[in-house]
Image (tube, grey):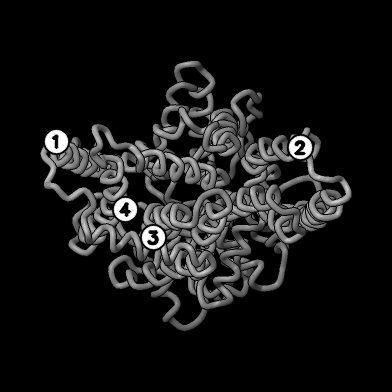
C-alpha cells in the first residue's frame, strides 16, 4: 500500500482536482436537464455585479490583486511557516542575493575553495552563483528588508498584479480581473514560486510587461509603454536568457509586421515614440549585463553558467550538442551528480527517450500552470484563437514549448516567460465557455462560476491537510529543515564554527548541504566537504580559531558532533 501511495503521490493533487471538476460537471449537467426554474441565482448575480464594478476601476483592481497575494501568504505563516532552501538552485540564488546585498557583483576566490565546491556555483575566476542576476537581485532586496523570502513574496505579488495589467490591455476589465485572480489562486499562494527561493516570478513578470505593452502600443504610441516593453525584455535577458529569447521571437515578428506592414503607423511617430526608446533601453540593459558578466567571469560575453558547464558538466545543455569529456572531480558527491546527468542525457538522445522526456516536461508544466481545472477553457479557445485576436499568444506558447523540447533539462518555471500568454488564452476560453448555452440552458456560465469555487476548494483542502499533517503533497514548509535547524543551533553558540559534511553510500544527489554565504571568512558557520584526514588538516589550520563539527547529511536525524579524526 505504501509503495502504491508513493507512486501516485506526485499526481495526487491533480487526481483530486480532476474528480472535483468531474463531480461539479455532473451536477451542472444534472441541473441543466432538471432545472430549478431559476436561470440566474441571485447570490451569483450580486457577486458578479460587485466583481464587475471593482474590475472596472482598473488601477484599484491591479493593486488589489498584488495586495491579496501578500496578505494571504503572510496570513498563512502559522500553518505553512517560512520556507527554507533545499535545492541546489535555491542556495545558488541565495549566494547571489547575499553578494548583491553586500554591495558587490561577485566575490574573490577563497584560498580553500576546493573544500567548498558545490553545485550551480563557480569558484574560479570568482566565487559566485552561475545564474543571471535578476533572481539574485530580487532576493537581495528581500534580504535588505529583513529576509530573502520577503523578496520572493513581493515579486510574486508584483507578478500577479502585472498579469492583471497585461490582461486589461487585451480583454474587458472584468475578464482581466478574473484571469489575474485565477493566477493568484494557482501560482501566487501555494506554488513553489512563492514557497521557495527560485524567484521564478520575476521571469513571468518580464513576459507580462512585454505582452501588456504590446496592445497598448498598437492602440496609442507612447514612450511609457515602449519603456515598459523594454523593461520586460531586459528582465527576461537577465533572468532566463534562452527562454526569453525564444519568447521574444514571435513578439519581434509581430512588431515588424506592425511597423512595416500595410497599416503601419507614421514613421515620424513610431521612430521617436517606439523604436528609439526600445533600442536605447535594450542597449543600456545589454551594456549593464555585459559588465556584470565581465566582473564575474572576466569576459563580457561569457556567462557564469558557461564557466560552470565547462568546469563540471559533461552533458551539454541541448540535445543536439556533443558531450564534453568527463573532468577529474575532487568529490564523490559531485562526480555522482554529473555522472547521473550524463546518463540522463544519453537516454534523452534516443527517440523513445526524447518522447518520454518531452511527455514528462509537458505533464509537469500542465500540472503546474493549468491542471484539470483550466484545461477545458484552453481546449475551447484553440479553435477560435484567430477570431479572438490571440494568435500572438498562441504562437508564443508554441514557440516556447518547442524551445523547451530542445533543452536537456526542464522545470515548470522554464516556461515562465509565457505565463501571461497562457493565461490570456485561458481567459479567452473562459469567455467563450461563458456563452455556451445548449438548449437555452446556461451550462457554460455554471461551469465558469465553478472554476474559481473549485480553485478555492483546492487551496482549502491543501491548507487543511497541511494543518492536520496529512501528506497529500511534499511537506510544508519546503526545504532542508535539518540543515536550517543546525544553523540555528550553531548560531546560538559562542564563537565561529566549521562543519565538515560527509554522506552515506545511498546519498540523495538533490539534497546538498555544502553551501556558504558570500563572505566565507566572516560567516558564523562555514560548511565544507570531508576530504579525508590529511586534506582536512589544511582547512583546520586556516580556520584554527573555529570550533569544528562533523555532520553526516544522510543520517536519519543529522546533528553536529565534535570532529574527531578517524584512527
Which residue is the extreme one toward the bottom? 494
Which residue has dot 4 on it? 452
Q: Calculate the distance from the C-alpha at mark 3 to the C-alpha at mark 1.
A: 37 Å
Tell me whether circle 2 and circle 1 mark residues in contact (CB < 8 Å): no
Q: Earlier in the sequence, mark 4 or mark 3?
A: 3
Q: Calculate the distance from the C-alpha at mark 2 to the C-alpha at mark 1.
A: 49 Å
Tell me whether circle 2 and circle 3 mark residues in contact (CB < 8 Å): no
Which residue has dot 2 on it? 263
Q: Earlier in the sequence, mark 2 or mark 1?
A: 1
Q: Where is residue 33, by image quadrant?
A: top left
Tell me whether circle 4 and circle 1 mark residues in contact (CB < 8 Å): no
Q: Nearer the viewer, mark 4 or mark 3?
A: 4
Q: Where is residue 439, by image quadrant?
A: top left
Q: Earlier in the sequence, mark 2 or mark 4?
A: 2
Q: Calculate the distance from the C-alpha at mark 2 to the C-alpha at mark 4.
A: 40 Å
Marking on residue 189: 3
Q: Is residue 48 left or right of residue 255?
A: left
* Quadrant of the image containing the N terminus: top left
Which residue has dot 1 on it? 33
Q: Secondary structure at mark 2?
A: loop
In the depicted view, which residue is nearer to us: 110 or 170?
170
Q: Is residue 523 left or right of residue 436?
A: right
| Residue drawn 45% across the image and 64% down it | 65
Marking on residue 357: none
Q: Residues within 10 Å of mark 1 (few under 14, many from 20)?
A: few
Q: Nearer the viewer, mark 2 or mark 3?
A: 2
Q: Measuring from the top left, give residue 237's x and y in whole percent.
A: 69, 49
Q: Earlier in the sequence, mark 2 or mark 3?
A: 3
Q: Is residue 253 above or below residue 207?
A: above
Asked whether residue 339 appears in the rendered view, the answer is no
Asked whether residue 119 appears in the rendered view, the answer is yes
Amino acid at each position: 500500500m505504501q509503495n502504491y501511495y508513493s507512486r501516485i503521490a506526485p499526481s495526487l493533487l491533480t487526481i483530486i482536482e480532476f474528480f472535483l471538476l468531474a463531480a461539479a460537471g455532473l451536477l451542472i449537467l444534472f441541473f441543466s436537464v432538471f432545472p430549478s426554474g431559476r436561470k440566474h441565482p441571485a447570490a451569483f448575480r450580486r457577486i458578479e455585479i460587485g466583481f464587475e464594478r471593482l474590475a472596472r476601476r482598473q488601477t484599484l483592481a491591479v493593486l488589489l490583486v498584488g495586495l491579496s497575494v501578500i496578505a494571504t501568504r503572510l496570513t498563512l505563516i502559522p500553518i505553512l511557516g517560512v520556507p527554507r532552501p533545499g535545492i541546489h538552485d535555491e542556495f545558488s540564488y541565495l549566494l547571489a542575493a547575499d553578494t548583491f546585498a553586500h554591495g558587490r557583483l561577485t566575490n574573490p576566490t577563497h584560498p580553500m575553495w576546493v573544500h567548498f565546491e558545490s553545485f550551480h556555483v563557480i569558484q574560479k575566476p570568482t566565487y559566485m552563483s552561475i545564474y543571471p542576476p535578476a533572481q539574485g537581485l530580487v532576493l537581495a532586496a528581500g534580504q535588505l528588508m529583513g529576509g530573502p523570502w520577503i523578496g520572493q513574496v513581493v515579486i510574486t505579488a508584483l507578478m500577479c498584479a502585472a498579469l492583471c495589467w497585461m490582461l486589461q490591455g487585451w480583454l474587458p476589465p472584468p475578464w482581466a480581473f478574473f484571469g489575474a485572480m485565477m493566477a493568484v489562486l494557482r501560482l501566487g499562494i501555494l506554488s513553489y514560486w512563492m514557497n521557495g527561493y527560485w524567484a521564478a516570478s520575476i521571469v513571468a513578470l518580464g513576459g507580462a510587461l512585454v505582452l501588456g505593452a504590446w496592445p497598448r502600443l498598437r492602440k496609442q504610441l507612447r514612450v511609457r509603454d515602449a519603456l515598459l516593453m523594454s523593461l520586460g525584455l531586459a528582465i527576461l535577458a537577465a533572468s532566463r536568457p534562452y527562454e526569453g529569447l525564444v519568447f521574444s521571437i514571435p513578439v519581434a515578428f509581430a512588431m515588424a509586421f506592425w511597423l512595416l506592414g500595410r497599416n503601419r503607423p507614421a514613421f515620424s511617430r513610431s521612430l521617436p515614440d517606439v523604436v528609439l526608446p526600445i533600442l536605447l533601453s535594450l542597449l543600456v540593459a545589454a551594456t549593464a549585463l555585459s559588465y556584470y558578466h565581465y566582473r564575474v567571469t572576466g569576459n563580457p560575453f561569457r556567462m557564469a553558467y558557461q564557466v560552470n558547464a565547462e568546469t563540471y558538466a559533461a552533458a551539454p545543455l541541448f540535445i543536439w550538442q556533443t558531450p564534453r569529456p568527463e573532468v577529474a572531480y575532487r568529490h564523490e558527491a559531485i562526480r555522482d551528480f554529473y555522472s547521473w546527468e550524463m546518463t540522463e542525457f544519453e537516454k534523452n538522445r534516443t527517440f523513445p527517450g526524447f518522447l518520454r522526456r518531452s511527455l514528462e516536461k509537458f505533464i509537469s508544466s500542465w500540472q503546474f500552470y493549468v491542471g484539470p481545472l483550466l484545461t477545458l477553457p484552453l481546449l475551447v479557445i484553440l479553435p477560435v484563437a484567430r477570431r479572438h485576436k490571440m494568435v500572438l499568444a498562441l504562437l508564443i506558447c508554441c514557440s516556447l514549448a518547442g524551445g523547451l523540447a530542445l533543452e536537456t533539462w526542464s522545470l515548470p518555471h522554464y516556461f515562465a516567460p509565457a505565463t501571461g500568454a497562457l493565461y490570456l488564452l485561458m481567459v479567452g476560453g473562459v469567455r467563450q465557455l461563458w456563452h455556451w448555452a445548449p438548449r437555452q440552458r446556461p451550462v457554460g456560465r455554471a461551469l465558469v462560476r465553478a472554476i474559481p469555487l473549485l480553485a478555492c476548494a483546492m487551496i482549502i483542502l491543501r491548507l487543511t491537510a497541511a494543518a492536520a499533517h496529512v501528506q497529500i503533497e511534499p511537506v510544508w514548509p519546503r526545504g532542508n529543515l535539518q540543515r536550517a535547524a543546525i544553523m540555528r543551533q550553531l548560531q546560538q553558540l559562542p564563537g565561529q564554527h566549521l562543519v565538515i559534511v560527509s554522506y552515506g553510500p545511498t546519498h540523495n544527489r538533490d539534497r546538498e548541504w555544502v553551501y556558504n554565504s558570500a563572505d566565507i571568512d566572516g560567516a558564523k558557520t562555514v560548511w565544507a566537504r570531508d576530504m579525508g584526514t590529511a586534506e582536512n588538516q589544511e582547512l583546520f589550520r586556516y580556520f584554527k580559531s573555529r570550533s569544528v563539527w562533523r555532520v553526516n547529511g544522510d543520517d536519519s536525524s543529522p546533528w553536529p558532533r565534535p570532529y574527531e579524526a578517524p584512527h
